[in-house]
Amino acid sequence: MYQGLINKYREFLPVSDKTPVITLNEGNTPLIKAENLAKKIGLNCEIYLKYEGLNPTGSFKDRGMTMAVSKAKEDGSQAVICASTGNTSAAAAAYAAKAGMRAYVLIPDGYIALGKLSQAMMYGAEIIAIKGNFDEALEMVIEISKNYPITLVNSVNPFRIEGQKTGAFEIIEALGDAPDYHFIPVGNAGNITAYFKGYEEFYALKKSSHLPKMMGFEAEGAAAIVKGERIYKPETIATAIRIGNPASWKQAERARDLSKGIINYVTDDEIIYAYKLLASTEGIFAEPASCASVAGVIKAQKLGLIEENKKLVCILTGNGLKDPDSAIKYSQSEVKKTDAKLDEIIKVMKF
Ligand SMILES: *Cc1c(COP(=O)(O)O)cnc(C)c1O
C-alpha cells in the first residue's frame, strides 16, 4: 500500500526512525499524456501533465507540508505558521490537524480563492487576513516565528523544498528518464527550486541521463525575477502566484542558469486561454496559476524555444475546484434554463 512520499522516498529525505511521519498519502500523482493539447497547439512533441491538483488538499503544497510538519513534530513544536495565497494555508491546516498541532495562517484579505479559504476554515486553522499582500504577510510570519515558539512552514523552511523535490523523482520514474523541458509556474519560486534539486539529485545518482531545461513562468503583473526588481503591487488573476518578492529568487535563477532554461512571464489573457484549453481538450481542471505552465509552453513555442520531438512536462500545481469563481467567470459557458418539460429540453438541445 502506498503510504505517502516520506515512506516512499525515505532514503533521499532528511528523516530518521525517530521522525513521526505525518502523512495524508500525498504524492504519487499521475503524469498524463496530453496528445490533444499538443495537436491543438501544433507542437510536434510529447507533452505530459503532472496533475498535482490530485494531492490530498488539492495542490503540490502537500508534498512540502508532510515534511515540514513531520519535522516540526519531531522537534516538539506545537504550532505552525505560514503566509499564504491560499494553498499553503490549506495544506498547513490539514497536516497540523493530522499532527494534533495548531496552525496560524496569514492571508492577503480579498485575494484568496474561496475553496482554499474554506479548507483552512474546515481544518481548523486560526485565519488572520491582513490588509496587505503575500510578500508583506511573509515578512511578518518570518518575524513572528523568530520571536515565538512556532514553526514557520513557508517554503523558506528547507524541509518544504525536500518534500517537494520528490515530484521530480516521480517524473523520472514515470518516464524512465528526465524530460527535456520542465514547465512550471513561478510564484515564491520554492517549487522550481525543489524540482531542480530533485532532478540534480537523481542525475547525480545516475537515475537520469540529463537535467531538463527549467522553464519557469511568472504572471506578467508579478514578474519580479523577469524584470529584475521587487514588484510592490503585484497583480494577476492567478492569485497563487501573485507574489512580488520571491523568497527563492536566487535559487530559481540558479536552476534557470545551470539547466540552460528560462524564466519568463505570461499575461492574464494567456493564462485564461490555457486554463480553458486544458479543461476543454484534456478534461483536466487546474486552477489559473497552474495554467501558467501550459501558457508558458505556448509562449515558448511562439518564441521558437522548443525543439521538435522532445519530451515536455508541465506541472499543474493546483486543482481547478479550488477557485470556482474564476471558472464560472472565464468559461463563458451559459447555463440554459427551461421548464421541466421534455419537448422544451429537446428544443434547447437543438435536435
Ligand atoms: C504555491 C503555488 C504556486 C507557486 O509555487 P512557488 O513555489 O511559490 O513558486 C503555483 N501554483 C499554485 C497552485 C500554488 O499553490
Image (tube, rainbow, N blue to C red):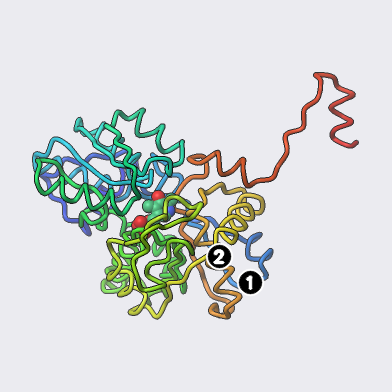
Residue 193 figure quarter: bottom left
Q: Nearer the viewer, residue 32 or 237?
A: 237
Residue 226 x/y as whole percent: 41, 72
Please indicate whether residue 189 sits to the left or right of residue 297 in the image: left
SS at circle 1: loop
Q: Badge 1: how crowded within 10 Å, few (<14), some, or many (20+)?
A: some
Residue 316 x/y as whole percent: 48, 54
Residue 128 figure quarter: top left
SS at circle 2: strand
Q: Which residue is mark 1?
A: 43
The quadrant of the rendered image in which ligand 1 is seen is bottom left
Q: Nearer the viewer, residue 185 or 170?
A: 185
**Gap in angstroms between the C-alphas marked 1 and 2:** 9 Å
Instruction: Identify which amino acid the numbered label 2 is placed on.
Output: Ile
Q: Nearer the viewer, residue 161 or 199?
A: 161
Residue 117 x/y as whole percent: 40, 35
Q: Which residue is mark 2?
A: 47
Residue 230 figure quarter: bottom left
Please indicate whether residue 92 sits to the left or right of residue 85 in the image: left
Q: Residue at x 26, y 74 (%)?
A: 204
Instruction: Identify which amino acid the numbered label 1 is placed on.
Output: Leu
User: Mark 1–mark 2 contact, CB under 8 Å?
Assistant: yes
Q: Is residue 169 visible?
A: no
Residue 284 x/y as whole percent: 57, 49
